[in-house]
Image (cartoon, rainbow, N blue to C red):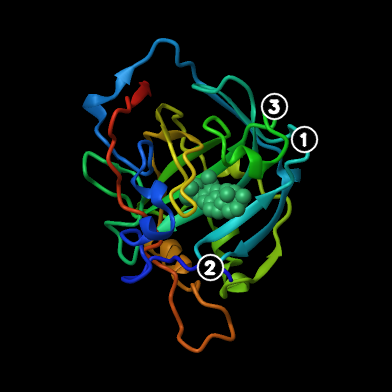
Amino acid sequence: TGDHWGYGKEDGPSAWHRHYPVAKGSRQSPIDIIPDEARRDSSLGPIFLKYDRCTSLSIANNGHSVVVEFDDSDDRSVIQGGPLDNPYRLKQFHFHWGGKGCEGSEHTVAGVGYASELHLVHWNAVKYTTYEDAATAPDGLAVLGIFLEQGDDHRWLHTITDVLYMVKFKGSATNFKGFNPKCLLPSNLHYWTYLGSLTTPPLHESVIWIVLKEPIVVSEKQLGMFRILQFSGEEEDQRMRMENNFRPPQPLKERILKKRC
Ligand SMILES: CCc1cc2c(cc1OS(N)(=O)=O)CC[C@@H]1[C@@H]2CC[C@]2(C)[C@@H](O)CC[C@@H]12
Ligand SMILES: [Zn+2]
């Protein structure tokens, strides 16, 4: 069976509602973030990130993005604070990017996109038994979104871009141990937060989004390394370069965007 959705003309975001009607739901992601309309919420404290380098396991090409998986068998790597009632365990992180510098992120800020967006995915292991269960619950997942802006070389992103050639094709994976994603965070953890969804099918409305205001800076060369990846497997004849794997902003509907400055 495999996934029958993608980012192309026929199977892309505008067609996902046919197999996944929740695509037109009330809390879909991403959204266009309008800073002036974000409500300051005094109950929102700072977020705390505790990441342990020993929990990283592997890096893989799943045919939609490049994903780094973590050992989530205990609370060594968690996010807490901010809008969250308890710690959420780090499960994976992945990226979305464009074909050129000015677009590629999923969230936009006052209509402006970034070159890429990093998603650090965490799940509520206090309330739910498995990641899969959490992924269908309204407070099951917490995704930390970080914008990537084109500029100078990023000191640590090399650790990832240097191994992308090993996961060029869909279905390929390799060891990726000893990586601490803390090195991918910007200096300032001020954030916007709102209730949303997965940004790819099955589009479950199970994500508490925490989007950092400050982007990290990566070079055009480093961004270009992501584009050596393929949507397609090694055996498939048509080579499909992996790029523009982002969903455009969705209606905010009855939601309130909150901020912690
Ligand atoms: C939030 C990160 C995340 C999780 C998942 C997807 C996509 C995701 O990326 S995103 N961009 O952060 O929304 C698509 C596949 C989903 C998975 C959550 C768990 C599942 C729903 C599995 O149960 C079966 C398919 C899985
Ligand atoms: Zn994502």
Q: Secondary structure at mark 3?
A: loop
Residue depicted at x 55% and y 61%:
66
Percent position (x, y) of residue 183?
57, 43
The amino acid type of the residue labelled 2 equals Gly
Q: Vertically, is 17 above or below 120?
A: below
The amino acid type of the residue labelled 3 equals Val
Residue 124 appears in the figure: yes
> In the picture, which quadrant includes the C terminus?
top left
Report which quarter residue 200 is drawn in.
bottom left
Q: Which residue is mark 2?
A: 63
Q: How would you rate the neighbour count of disc 3 (Cα within 10 Å): few for under 14, some for 14-19, many for 20 or more?
A: some
In this rendering, position of residue 67 left or right of residue 194: right
Q: Which residue is mark 1?
A: 74
Q: Vertically, is 179 above or below 174?
A: above
Q: Secondary structure at mark 2?
A: loop
Q: Which residue is mark 3?
A: 126
Labels 1 and 3 touching (C-beta < 8 A): no
Residue 156 appears in the figure: no
Q: Vertically, is 196 above or below 226?
A: above
Q: Earlier in the sequence, mark 2 or mark 1?
A: 2
In this rendering, position of residue 27 left or right of residue 171: left
In this rendering, position of residue 179 left or right of residue 226: right
Q: CA separation, marks 3 and 2?
A: 31 Å
Q: Earlier in the sequence, mark 3 or mark 2?
A: 2
